[in-house]
Image: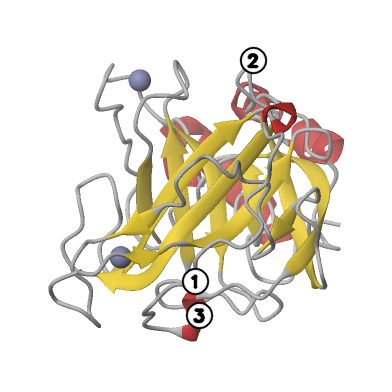
Amino acid sequence: MAHPLRPSTEAILDALPDLAPFARDAVVLRPERGEPNPGDSSIGGPLLWPSDEPWPMCSLPDEVNPVGLPATAMVPVVQIFKREVPGPWWPADADLLQILWCPNEHWDPPAQQADVSPVVELRWRRAADVDSRLVAPPSPSRHAEDGYLPEPCTVTGEALTDFPFREELPPELRPALEELVDKTGDGGDVITRVVGWKLGGWPTWHLTHPMVFHCRTCHTGMTLLFTVASDAETGVIVGRWGDLRIFACPVDHRHPFQVDLH
Ligand SMILES: [Zn+2]
Ligand SMILES: [Zn+2]
């Protein structure tokens, strides 16, 4: 359950039919500490990584090492197989999404990365292309916060329909949405602030006004691809117990992604 008090999609749309055009598929990943295998979807688990592909390293200055050298190894954040979370996110030629990051705080990273955060790497691949797996990837030589080293967790995907934060809606729809939000849940917003690790869906904007990131290659408005949440199960803490979000270009997954912290 996304939230025990969250109304069903049907109930939300019955109450507010004008929300229908804004509905987006999402999958919330429920983590549970364990020993995931390289063939499993996981958080902080071993990746199905080709032995002939260099492991991502980071040589950006960070708060532990202001020079950034020698480069330090990135760590697995999440690995997702399409068979477990089918949906509109998958490029035609990919069935495996892998996200890694450098577990340090970077004060002035390249513009596509979030400030004061880990630096993110992302791979789309076909699992069948990995015929020889890298068995012993390098470990980071430095890291700032334990909150950037996810505990190995298996994940269970839970599909839901996500709706945008009120400020992303046309003004005439906002009062009715606010009324619906106030009437449901336990005081929080269980309709447009789905908590947790999430593939797809909408970003929340409860701290700042909504922003649209535009693809650096084709200028299309980017959509939310993945949300890394702060939680006790994975031990991940980003920002002030916030979310790290990865936005992607809906036109071409090979265009650069954009990261923000909320
Ligand atoms: Zn780094
Ligand atoms: Zn693009």
Q: Is mark 1 on a helix, strand or loop?
A: loop
Q: What element carries label 2?
A: loop
With respect to residue 156, does 61 lie above or below?
A: below
With respect to residue 3, does 224 lie above or below?
A: above
* Residue at the image point whose x is 47% and y is 24% from the top: 253
Q: Quadrant of residue 161?
A: top right
| Residue on which the image places disc 3 | 147
Q: Earlier in the sequence, mark 2 or mark 1?
A: 2
With respect to residue 98, does 23 lie above or below?
A: above
Q: Earlier in the sequence, mark 3 or mark 1?
A: 1
Give the amino acid at mark 3.
Gly
Q: In which quarter of the image is the C terminus?
A: bottom left
- Dividing the image into four equal quarters, which quarter contains ligand 2? top left
* Residue at the image point whose x is 67% and y is 24% from the top: 88
Mark 2 nearby-residue class (10 Å; few <14, some 14–19, many ≥20)? few
* Residue at the image point whose x is 63% and y is 17% from the top: 93
Q: Does the residue labelled 1 lie within 8 Å of ligand 1?
A: no
Residue 153 in the image, given as x and y percentages of width and height: 75, 68
Give the amino acid at mark 2.
Ala
- Frontmost residue, 84 versus 25: 84
| Residue on which the image places disc 1 | 139
| Residue on which the image places disc 2 | 92
Residue 130 in the image, given as x and y percentages of width and height: 68, 34
With respect to residue 58, does 85 lie above or below?
A: above
